[in-house]
């Protein structure tokens, strides 16, 4: 037997043995339940992580094999009931995950196996998460198709007229939470595993992590305060406390993570910074992904803590007879205060976001000196827009802040969610263009 054959056999043994370990880890993690989602489905502790790491280290063919085997293990584990569901619900999605990690590699697929963790660390974090997100979307589509067929009775029991809508919401809720956990663990791994590469990967990760933390705190403290004290305009104390909570979070985060990422913690702000030329498009996509994941994680932890303590969510509906929450609010945004009027909601959110982002652009403009009070001014500006906006929409002015609670609250929060994504982005973009126009006009006047 030649040395080349022996070496090749050793590499195959390494692939197979490592694959077995990854399969075992993935299957064990998939059986653990962190918490149940309001629409059903259990969130697991990043059970797809071993599959992705394996796909990165050993290539698409081996990634496909382990993903396919894992989907069959799910059938054996009693998760699915028919082979048809295996194909739609798991095999397609997990096969995509098998390719997801490897697709982020720049390395030659024929390169020799050497230091699997090193190859994983050498891959682009952004690409790994991006491809993983695509894989989750593929799995979600398969799950939706499966749900339309198999969940018709459950949809009716849950009060949904359409099995399609129920399947979309049901599968989307826990898959989004699972993806959020996966992204957090991936970031931690990238920060822990050393790299010999001389690049700005760590700096980028630090920025994204800061945005994750900032948005997590914003939702956890801001929405948590609304849940604890209520933010009904009739209840003046809770109304003001909620507005102050959101503003004070901005102040705290501005002076802690502001030096690292700029403390956007808001996709609308990040969009304005791109338009203003203050950040790159690559950073922008990373920012909004981690802002959204931070918001989802913050909302998920709030739901878990309130359920654990038996505390009433003042923004939801409490059933006194059953002594449990009939529906959760989680400080989510809806059009209830606008009497369901979509146009009113769009106007309120767009205008308030315009005011908030315009303030941020002015305070952070390097051409003007505002001393060290920038964070305080921005925080007070958020309090200002909340004072008016809470009675209409609950005040979003931040798509990520709305997405997180809506996923766990469901109902009207999910139905109205698009308003709180579109309007703040429009308001932020208009603020960027307006600020650029008025400052350029001022500069030309001074030159003249």
Image: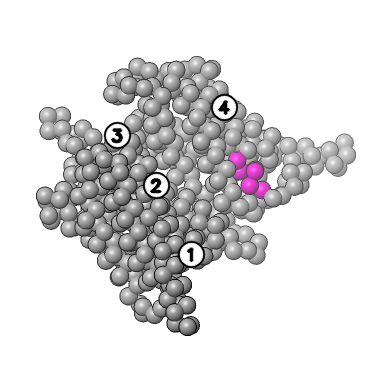
Q: Nearer the viewer, residue 373 or 433?
A: 433
- Assess whether mark 3 and mark 4 are in contact (beta carbons under 8 angstroms): no
Residue 306 in sight from this viewpoint: no
Relative height, residue 41 to residue 120 (above, below): above
C-alpha gap between disc 2 and disc 4: 34 Å
Q: Secondary structure at mark 4?
A: helix
Going from the N terminus, do you reach mark 2 or mark 4 first?
4
Which residue is under mark 1? Answer: 276
Please tell me whether residue 267 belongs to the stretch shown in magenta. Answer: no
Earlier-in-chain disc, 4 versus 1: 4
At which x and y percent is residue 22?
A: 58, 38
Tag nearer the camera, 2 or 3 = 2
Measure the alpha-carbon separation of dots 4 and 3. Answer: 30 Å
The residue most toward the right is 2
Mark 1 and mark 3: Cα distance apart in space: 36 Å
Q: Which residues are magenta?
A: 100-105
Could you tell me which secondary element the residue under label 2 belongs to? helix
Q: Which residue is mark 2?
A: 422
Mark 1 / mark 3, whichever is N-terminal? 1
Of tags 4 and 1, which is closer to the observer? 1
Choose the circle earlier in sequence order: 2 or 3. Answer: 3
Closest to the observer: 241 or 436? 436
Classify 204 as above or below 126: below
Instruction: Look at the magenta stretch and give its main secondary structure.
Output: helix
Instruction: Residue 236 in the image: state x and y as whole percent.
Output: 12, 55
Residue indicated by mark 4: 91
């Amino acid at each position: 037997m030649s040395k080349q054959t022996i070496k090749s056999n050793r590499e195959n043994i390494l692939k197979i043995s490592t694959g077995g370990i990854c399969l075992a880890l993935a299957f064990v993690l998939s059986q653990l339940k962190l918490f149940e989602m309001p629409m059903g489905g259990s969130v697991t502790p990043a059970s797809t992580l071993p599959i992705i790491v394996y796909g990165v280290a050993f290539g698409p063919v081996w990634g496909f094999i382990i993903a396919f085997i894992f989907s069959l293990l799910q059938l054996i584990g009693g998760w699915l009931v028919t082979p048809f569901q295996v194909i739609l619900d798991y095999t397609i999605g997990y096969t995509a995950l098998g390719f997801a990690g490897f697709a982020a590699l720049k390395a030659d697929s024929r390169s020799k196996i050497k230091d699997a963790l090193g190859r994983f660390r050498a891959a682009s974090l952004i690409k790994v998460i991006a491809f993983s997100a695509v894989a989750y979307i593929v799995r979600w589509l398969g799950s939706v198709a499966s749900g339309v067929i198999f969940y018709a009775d459950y949809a009716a029991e849950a009060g949904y007229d359409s099995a399609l809508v129920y399947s979309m919401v049901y599968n989307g809720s826990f898959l989004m939470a699972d993806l959020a956990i996966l992204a957090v663990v991936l970031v931690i791994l990238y920060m822990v595993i050393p790299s010999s590469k001389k690049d700005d990967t760590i700096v980028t990760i630090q920025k994204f992590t800061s945005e994750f933390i900032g948005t997590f705190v914003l939702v956890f403290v801001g929405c948590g305060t609304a849940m604890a004290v209520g933010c009904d305009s009739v209840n003046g104390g809770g109304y003001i406390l909620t507005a102050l909570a959101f503003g004070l979070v901005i102040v705290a985060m501005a002076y802690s993570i502001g030096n690292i990422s700029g403390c956007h913690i808001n996709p609308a702000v990040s969009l304005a910074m791109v338009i203003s030329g203050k950040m790159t498009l690559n950073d922008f996509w990373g920012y909004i992904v981690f802002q959204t994941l931070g918001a989802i994680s913050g909302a998920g932890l709030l739901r878990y803590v309130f359920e654990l303590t038996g505390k009433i969510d003042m923004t939801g509906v409490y059933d006194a007879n059953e002594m449990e929450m009939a529906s959760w609010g989680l400080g989510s945004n809806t059009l209830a205060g606008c009497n369901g009027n979509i146009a009113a909601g769009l106007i309120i959110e767009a205008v308030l976001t315009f005011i908030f982002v315009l303030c941020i652009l002015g305070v952070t403009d390097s051409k003007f000196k505002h001393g060290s009070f920038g964070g305080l001014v921005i925080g007070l500006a958020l309090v200002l827009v909340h004072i008016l906006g809470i009675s209409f929409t609950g005040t979003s002015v931040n798509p990520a802040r709305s997405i997180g609670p809506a996923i766990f609250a469901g109902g009207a929060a999910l139905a109205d969610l698009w308003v709180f994504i579109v309007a703040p982005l429009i308001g932020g973009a208009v603020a960027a263009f307006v600020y650029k126009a008025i400052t350029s006009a001022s500069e030309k006047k001074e030159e003249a």
